Each structure stands twice: as C-alpha cells, then as structure tokens.
Image (cartoon, rainbow, N blue to C red):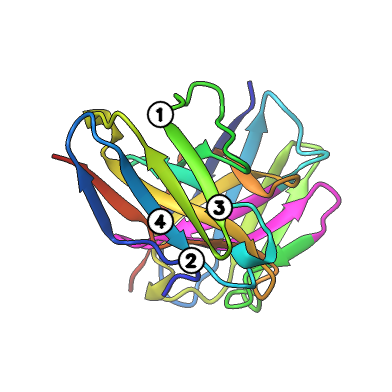
Amino acid sequence: QVRLHQWGAGLLKPSETLSLTCAVYGGSVSGYYWSWIRQAPGKGLEWIGEINHGGNTNYNPSLKSRVTLSVGTANNHFSLRLTSVTAADTAVYYCASLVSVGYYFDLWAQGTLVTVSS
Amino acid sequence: QSVLTQPPSVSGAPGQRVTLSCTGSTSNIGAGYDVHWYRQLPGTAPKLLVYGHNNRPSGVPDRFSGSKSATSASLVISGLQAEDEADYYCHSYDNNMSGSVFGGGTKLTVL
C-alpha cells in the first residue's frame, strides 16, 4: 500500500525559502504525477503545482515565479521550494499523488504547517 | 475567491439526504472535465471521496454519489450520519489555470 510522508521546516522568516520534501513508500515516483497543495488557516485548498517522474511541471500562475518542484527517482521523493515567503504563505502544505487519467488526487500526506513570521 | 463555488455551509438531520453543490464555468466543469470530491475532518488531510463519473475509492459507502451537469456538479449524501460532519471540497481541471482548481469548501453539519 502506497503511503506518502512529508517533512520540512515549519517556521520561516519573511523573505526566506520554504523547502518541503515528500517521500513515497510502498511505491515508486516513476510513472506518476505528484502535486503540492496548500491550505491557509481557516481557508480552502489551493493548488501549487505538479510534477511527473520525468521532471515535467505545471505551476499555479499566481505562484509560478517563486515555485520550483523537483523529483528524485533515486531516493523516491519529490520536493517543493517556494522563495521569498511572506505571511500570506502561512498555510498547511500537503503533498499528494495525482492520477493523471481523470485528474484527481488519490493519496495525501499528513500535511506540514508552515508559519511565516518575523 | 475560489474558481469553483460551493455554499459555505449545509446542514441536515441524521437519516436525511443532503446535496452539496459546486458551480464552475466553461473553462473547467463546462469544458467537460471531471469533478471530484474530498472530505476533510478537522486537523487532518483531505481524503478522496468520489471521483470521475460517480466512482468511489475502496471503503467509501454508496451513500455518497456524485453527478455533473453543464457547468455544475453535486455530491449527494443519503442516510446522513453523525460522522459525515466534515468539510467537503470539489475539484476539477481548469484550462485557464492549466491545472487544478478547488471549491471554497462546504461545512456539513449534522443536526
């Protein structure tokens, strides 16, 4: 059974870079699409972007200039970097697997609360 | 402002049937893309509930059913139970975004 587990720094100062990693257990990053989604406190879900095992990416246009997704087939993980964070980036960040046929998220990790505060 | 529009709250009594709506546009639902539904309990990650043409992951009871028409979609929950109290989100693909869009979520309260 495939499971996702994510980790990364939970407290950042404005202008710093957010970095999160998501590991795939019981499966392979190869042959699938992987996504990052965030949820600001008390708010709805916001799609950040997606990447496949070949490194092809799609980003939310509102975040595109600051986001980089990468995938590591050797250690079976994928990562998110978001530069120049502000308080508006405070949110719970989730990694998820995307089923490309039908385009839905079938598996989610536990989430990481990232707080941006001076 | 979410691209897909959901009512902020819906309520129903145990045993009743409730309908959660999700309204989009010609760049997402109206373009023919599937609509999917997720349930989120407080403090936990969203979980896939219904996907595509009324498909359910293993373990999701058939009390949950999804449908789509023109630029909108609905999630129907029949035989409402106390444990159904949660936030529900709809999701689709959007041509303008070239990616995913979500509804703002509906909080379901079981009276």
Quadrant where the C terminus of chain B is found in the figure: top left
- Is B69 in front, or is B89? B69
Quarter residue A107 falls in = top right
Work out how far the residue at label 3 is from the one at label 1, CA to CA, in angstroms.
Answer: 17 Å
From this view, report whether residue A91 is shown above or below residue B51.
below
Which chain is indicated by disc 1?
B
Q: Earlier in the sequence, mark 2 or mark 1?
A: 2
Q: How crowded is mark 3: few (under 14 residues within 10 Å), some or many (20 or more)?
A: many
Q: Name the residue under label 2.
A: B4
Element assignment for label 4: strand
The residue positioned 38% from the left and 61% from the top of the image is B6
Quadrant where the N terminus of chain B is found in the figure: bottom left
Q: What stretch is highlighted in magenta?
A: A34-56
Q: In this view, does B97 lie to the left or right of B2?
A: right
Q: Name the residue under label 4.
A: B21
The residue positioned 19% from the left and 31% from the top of the image is B14
Q: Name the residue under label 3.
A: B68
Which chain is indicated by disc 3?
B
Check chain identity for marks 4 and 2: say if they share one: yes
